[in-house]
Amino acid sequence: MRTNFPVPVPPARRDDVQHEVHPPKVELFDLAAMTNTDPKGFTRRVQEYRETEYGLYMSRPVVGHRRIAHFESLLLPAAGLRVSRWRPRRGVDLGHDFYIDVVDATDGPVWRTVDLYLDVLVRTGRDLRVEDSDELLAALRAGLVDLSTAQRAMERAYAVVEGVSRAGYDVDSWLAVHGIAAPWETP
């Protein structure tokens, strides 16, 4: 017997558009220079970097963005994740509280992430959604990533979905299960 259960679907991001196939995006985190260089090559000043036993915390204002005022990220190289929390501008609903990128991350004086396309967006206490699986598959078809990279990305995304769901869609609780204290400055 088949039963149809209503499945709540989180809202899609408002700026959702079709993206062309692109190679994995690389981002740099230069601790000595106190800068963050995004995949497009824009370098921005960082307010704070903090190295911890499990990764790197970054906090910086977002100047000139119409929706985002402040940006915090926690790079977790062992897990292959970047957990971010964005503070929106007044009156803006970003549609998520946490944005978790599946990445390959390396540490050093200049930390580096290679984005593996998949993202998990979490609304605290409510739900989550996985985005950009179409981008991962397009990159795989185009030979921009190999099968083992795509599999690694999917396994990490599924582990996030399972862990955050079990934690009641609470990213801070999920981090705590792994012995990671929530580093966020924003309320």
Image (tube, rainbow, N blue to C red):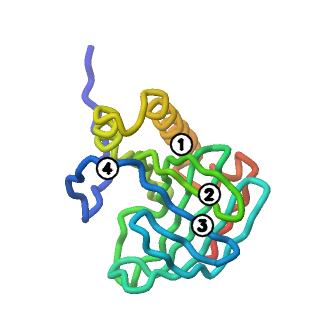
Q: Quadrant of residue 182?
A: bottom right
Disc 3 crowd, CA 10 A, few/some/many (<14, 14-19, 20+): many
Label whose residue precedes the other's in the sequence (2 or 3): 3
Disc 4 crowd, CA 10 A, few/some/many (<14, 14-19, 20+): few
Tag shown at residue 60 = none
Visible residue check, residue 53: yes
Visible residue check, residue 187: no
Element carrying mark 2: strand
Q: CA distance from mark 4 to mark 1?
A: 24 Å
Tell me the kind of residue under disc 2. Leu
Residue 27 versus residue 148 in the image, above or below: below
Rendering coords of residue 33 (x, y %): 65, 78
Label whose residue precedes the other's in the sequence (1 or 3): 3
Label whose residue precedes the other's in the sequence (4 or 2): 4
Label whose residue precedes the other's in the sequence (1 or 2): 2
Location of the C terminus by quadrant is bottom right
Task: Kindly report which numbered mark, 4 or 1, lies closer to the viewer in this rendering.
Answer: 4
Residue position marked by numbered label 2 in the rendering: 75
| In-image side of 71 versus 79 (left or right) | left
Element carrying mark 1: helix
Do the CB atoms of the residues marked 2 and 3 lie less than 8 Å apart? Answer: yes
